[in-house]
Image: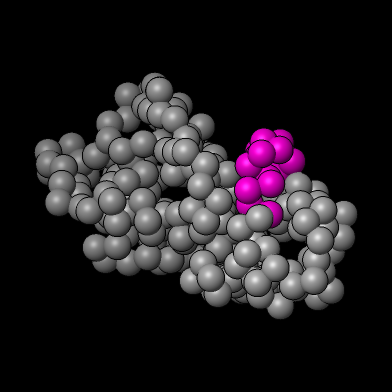
């Protein structure tokens, strides 16, 4: 959180000098889509329905920022600065650190504008749980699943490992991923969703995954 807020001062000064909306024409709908695809696996953002815990909780970070007087234009600038130059950053270790320029140009503007429109705002509610959308937002950045059109390679390829698994096995790997580690992949990278998903939501996600791989 401190890293995100650390860029605020210089961006705030720029916003004050220009006196304009940094991304007034940005496509926030596309920004939401890109955020869920590229960022949701690592960041909590209630408005997007994402629960990743590898990176900072964006609601918590910008709730404090808003309370201290940071406006939406400045938040956009902070987010865009962090996309271009995340700190700390080690390009060789993308399983831990956020790589620079996950999105660029107008896409980066769209993501920044979207995050600024929802992060840390009181009263923002998570979207309705829809298993394919939850998977795309929270899991697709790390896992390949043909039916979802995702190509993440930090975790196992689900088209390869899920066929033949029982619903109970799949549910355990989601709720408690450390219980059974896939060969060749480190422990502790995938968050446990036992406290994030209700039993019904977990069942819906398991059913979606089974159907996606022909089970």
Q: Is residue 49 visible?
A: yes
**Colouring mode (rainbow / by chain / secondary structure / one colour):** one colour
**Residue at the spot 32% in from the left edge and 24% down from the top edge:** 69
x%, y% of residue 153? Answer: 62, 73
Determine the residue positioned at 15% across, 46% down. 24
Q: Residue at x 44, y 38 (%)?
A: 127
Task: Point out the stretch of residues depicted in magenta.
Answer: 193-206
Q: Where does residue 52 sit, x and y in percent of width and height?
A: 59, 48
Q: Position of residue 118 (x, y in %)?
A: 36, 36
Left or right: residue 206 versus residue 134 is: right
Q: Which residue appears at 12% of the width and 38% of the height?
A: 19
Q: Is residue 75 magenta?
A: no
Where residue 193 sits: x, y (%)?
A: 70, 44
Q: Quadrant of residue 21?
A: top left
- Residue nearest the viewer, comparing 194 with 191: 194
Q: Does residue 33 appear left or right of residue 146 in this picture?
A: left
């Amino acid at each position: 959180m401190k890293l995100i807020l650390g860029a605020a001062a210089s961006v705030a000064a720029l916003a004050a000098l220009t006196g304009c909306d940094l991304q007034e024409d940005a496509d926030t709908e596309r920004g939401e889509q890109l955020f869920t695809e590229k960022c949701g696996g690592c960041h909590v953002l209630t408005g997007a329905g994402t629960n990743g815990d590898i990176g900072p909780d964006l609601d918590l970070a910008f709730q404090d920022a808003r309370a201290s007087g940071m406006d939406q234009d400045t938040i956009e600038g902070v987010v865009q600065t962090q996309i271009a130059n995340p700190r700390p950053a080690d390009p060789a270790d993308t399983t831990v650190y956020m790589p620079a320029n996950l999105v660029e140009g107008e896409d980066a503007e769209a993501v920044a504008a979207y995050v600024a429109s929802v992060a840390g705002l009181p009263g923002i509610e998570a979207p309705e749980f829809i298993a394919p959308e939850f998977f795309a937002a929270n899991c697709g950045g790390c896992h390949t699943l043909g039916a979802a059109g995702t190509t993440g390679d930090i975790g196992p390829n689900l088209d390869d490992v899920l066929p033949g698994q029982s619903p109970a096995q799949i549910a355990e790997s989601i709720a408690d991923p450390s219980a059974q580690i896939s060969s060749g992949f480190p422990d502790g990278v995938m968050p446990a969703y036992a406290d994030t998903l209700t039993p019904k939501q977990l069942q819906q996600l398991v059913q979606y995954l089974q159907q996606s791989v022909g089970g």
